Amino acid sequence: MYHVCCNRQKPVFVYYPYYGWPGYPPYYMPACCPVCSMPYYQCTCKGEKTMMLPEELTVDTSSPKEAFIGGNEDVNLTLEYMSDGGTPASRSVKLTITGTGGTTVWEETNITDGYHVKNDFASIPPGSMVKIEVKNCKARLRWCESVCC
């Protein structure tokens, strides 16, 4: 019997239950690695276990705030922001990313009323610093760090 749950392209052999001696419960052999979701014969993680840790940096009137990006892979940032009084011309969100390759600045001004999201708008390596500054806004920066445990 073949099953394509893991690789979605190549068939993967799924083991039938082995009953062994009468009276003992059957056991099942999983077809895919629970860490990397690849068939065991194509597994590249070599038993390493990874966890995704959600991180966030929230900023309101106590602007600016900084955070350190960790983990062992690049992270994708998601920025959420909304108005907190004032006129649209007085509202702004500024994100500064400082890494080994230099500094990148992203700024949004004239923010309209309501909730705004920028999904996966920046990918940055571990070891970088992020800094958020807001004026008449609330903002939250989110990302997930991959760590080995």
Image (cartoon, rainbow, N blue to C red):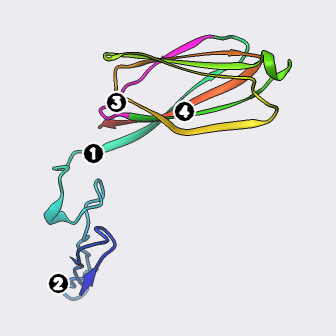
Q: Which residue is mark 2?
A: 20
On the image, the x and y values in percent for residue 60 come to: 71, 18
Which mark is in front, 1 or 3? 3
The magenta stretch is: 64-74
Q: Which residue is mark 1?
A: 49
Q: Secondary structure at mark 4?
A: strand
Which mark is in front, 4 or 2? 4
> Is residue 71 one of those drawn in magenta?
yes
Q: Is residue 47 left or right of residue 70?
A: left
Q: Is residue 73 left or right of residue 144?
A: left
Among the two numbered marks 3 and 2 on one chain, the one whose residue lies closer to the N terminus: 2
Magenta stretch prevailing secondary structure: loop
Residue occupying image coordinates x 17% and y 84%: 20
Cα distance in 3D space between marks 1 and 3: 13 Å
Residue type at the position of mark 1? Lys
Residue type at the position of mark 4? Arg
Label number found at residue 142: 4
Residue occupying image coordinates x 30% and y 76%: 4
